[in-house]
Amino acid sequence: MNIHEYQAKELFEKYGVATPKGVAVKASAEYSTALGQINTANGIMVKSQIHAGGRGKGTFTNGFKGGVKFSPNKEKAIENATAMLGNTLVTAQTGAEGRKVQTIYFTEAANLGKRPDGRDDEYYLAILLDRATSRPVIVASTEGGVEIEQVAHATPEKIFKVQVDPAVGLQPFQARQIAFALGFSGDLFKQCVTLVTRLYQLYWDKDCAMVEVNPLLVTKEGQLLALDAKVSFDDNALFRHPDIVALRDLNEEDAKEIEASKYGLSYIALDGNIACLVNGAGLAMSTMDIIQHFGGSPANFLDVGGGATKDQVSAAFKIILGDKNVKGILVNIFGGIMDCNVIATGIVEAVKETGLKLPLVVRLEGNNVQAGKATLAASGLTIVSGDTMADAAQKIVKLVNQK
Amino acid sequence: MSILVQENTRVLVQGITGDFGARHARLSIEYGSQIVAGVTPGKGGQIFEHNGVKVPIFNTVADAAKQTGATVSAIFVPPPFAADAILECVDADLDLAIAITEGIPVRDMVRAKRAMQGRRTRLIGPNCPGVVTPGRGEKSHGGCRIGIAPGYIHKRGKVGVVSRSGTLTYEAVWQLTCKGHGQSTCVGIGGDPVNGTSHLDVIKLFNEDPETEAIIMIGEIGGNAEVEAARWIKEHCKKPVAGFIAGATAPAGRRMGHAGAVIGGAEDTAAAKIKIFKECGISVAATPSDMADALLRIWKG
């Protein structure tokens, strides 16, 4: 689960990690009050709150450029906020449809410190799981404020990593290693050790999937400040964090994915036109692959789970048909334990209920498959049967391309 | 022989009184597997009965193992309690804990895996279909089925199968069986980021197993476990290996953010993994329908 920057910074504040003071607003009537609560003497940052990166370089569908803007005074801040709130921001990560900005975050503009070579004094820090070792890893770099992949690619020696032993947690010497690696001394060294320790505590306490600060900044006044904050959580652990669940913003999630999750279905929308309905994540992924292999384009990932019921199949059809790009459907079920005839009955009911007019290819395999195929054949519906995954995929691609 | 479990392996089931655990305990009993104990804290002394087989229920794994000689546990307990269930197997010095449970918090698994270091117990999973060593009876009856895989699709034979995914494993197994080729053991290592046994661990076991003559390895995008296994296969594996990687069309944006790419490197996409498989001499299936054929192109059975 993802949260907004302003929510992440509220968490940082709770853990004693310094961020620029800010106020989040959801309506234009609140602008003046909000701006009155922060020190605007050095100017104000106006930041669109959406769950996607690349906001600064994004463009609104109304033509306004930049989802993050420096504003020298309150009047300009209100002007910028007005151009953003309620409008749709398209960034490198949102896709062409963009995201509607429903919250604006005003923060005090920080006095950026400079390095001897004139660059802004910006760093990178992240905590996440290292899959190779099954341990948390802290990633730090002196090269902040840019895409970390670029740093890793061009100058891998500037990426510093510390692995944490979960039996004992982050040790003080490890926090010192990071502060030394980033080149800090004196008071900044102490600030860095404290900041790393507290962010790790947050990561561990709240079952975070990732805590990322980019950039981490040194101000002219010599303060270490988290200028941006990105925090995501392990969905499997949300049951023990009601405070985190309360931060969920359904506006940021795909309506069809939310609907799917109500029925225990795992659905992800894609750009293609052949919808698929499959049991099991691995099979669902490879069903998408085989559609593409034979020249088609998958419209979604949809896993109905290992023990799909009639109701789930019916709900899955409705969700699939909610996508207007869909021109055909491929059902691929390997009914190991579950009865293929139950699935077939569910398909027939769903087709009748939704009045489906699109081509439908069904590949059933496994338990009681003959009865399942008989049910489909006896339904009087135009359902094309596929014998293998390859056969079924070729048939649906052909049917869709004919149209 | 087979790997990890044999026809006579004595199995206990943690969570046998829950719907999910009970259902699959029954199916394993019907398959002829030796389900010898159940564990549900507070229900010790009760009996789980199916098809005339009486399975005693114990309060603790240690009691169940001591009194029945069970050496392997199938874990079906709900996610919040699953890591605890795994560690209870470790404490009882079982040979193997197979965690079927889906949805265990990553932090719980990070701690449990650390606590298992240097201990006797091997973990398979979590979030996995389990392990099947097919039997020699009709429709492979009499084998050791631990987990949720359909037993009847198997056939006893010479091919080892290892995969993260359940249904994709069944697909490969069914293709083999339909073509007349049986399996030594089929292992589902699970789809979670933190798991107990890797592709490579299982490949090493197959490499040493005299009954296994050929191997199918099924992987997917994310992490570098398949790549690690492929490189080892190139250097050390004595047996023909076919492979498949799922997720060529998966949207990249759904994976972990920036720093994850730093850790994962460039080797966790499907295209990169397939390229490395080929470089390592693995016969790559073009589609999931081609898994058995990919093996049969390099192995005559």
Image (cartoon, rainbow, N blue to C red):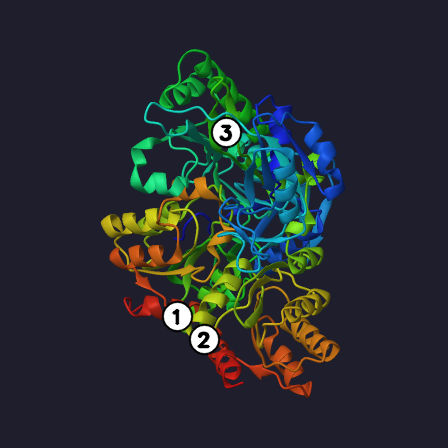
Label 2 crowd bin: few (<14), some (14–19), many (20+), radius 10 Å: some
Q: Is residue B93 left or right of residue A155?
A: right
Residue A282 visible somewhere in the drawing: yes
Report which residue position mark 1 lands on.
B290
Task: Compute the Cα span from label 2 to label 1.
Answer: 8 Å
Three-letter amino acid code of the residue under disc 1? Asp
| Image location (x, y in percent) of residue B27 | 62, 58
Label 1 crowd bin: few (<14), some (14–19), many (20+), radius 10 Å: some
Q: Quadrant of residue A379?
A: bottom right
| Image location (x, y in percent) of residue A32 | 72, 35
| Image location (x, y in percent) of residue A221 | 49, 17
Q: Quadrant of residue B44?
A: top right
Q: Is residue B53 left or right of residue A89?
A: right
Q: Does the CB distance between marks 2 and 1 fall below 8 Å?
A: yes
Q: Is residue A322 left or right of residue A198?
A: right
Residue B66 visible somewhere in the drawing: no
Q: Are marks 2 and 1 on the same chain?
A: no
Q: Secondary structure at mark 3?
A: helix
Q: Secondary structure at mark 2?
A: helix
The quarter of the picture where the C terminus of chain A appears is bottom right
Report which residue position mark 3 lands on.
B115
Q: Are marks 3 and 2 on the same chain?
A: no
| Image location (x, y in percent) of residue A349 | 73, 76
Report which residue position mark 2 lands on.
A390
Q: Nearer the viewer, mark 3 or mark 1?
A: 1
Task: Compute the Cα span from label 3 to label 2.
Answer: 44 Å
Identity of the residue drawn at 48% across and 42% down: B195
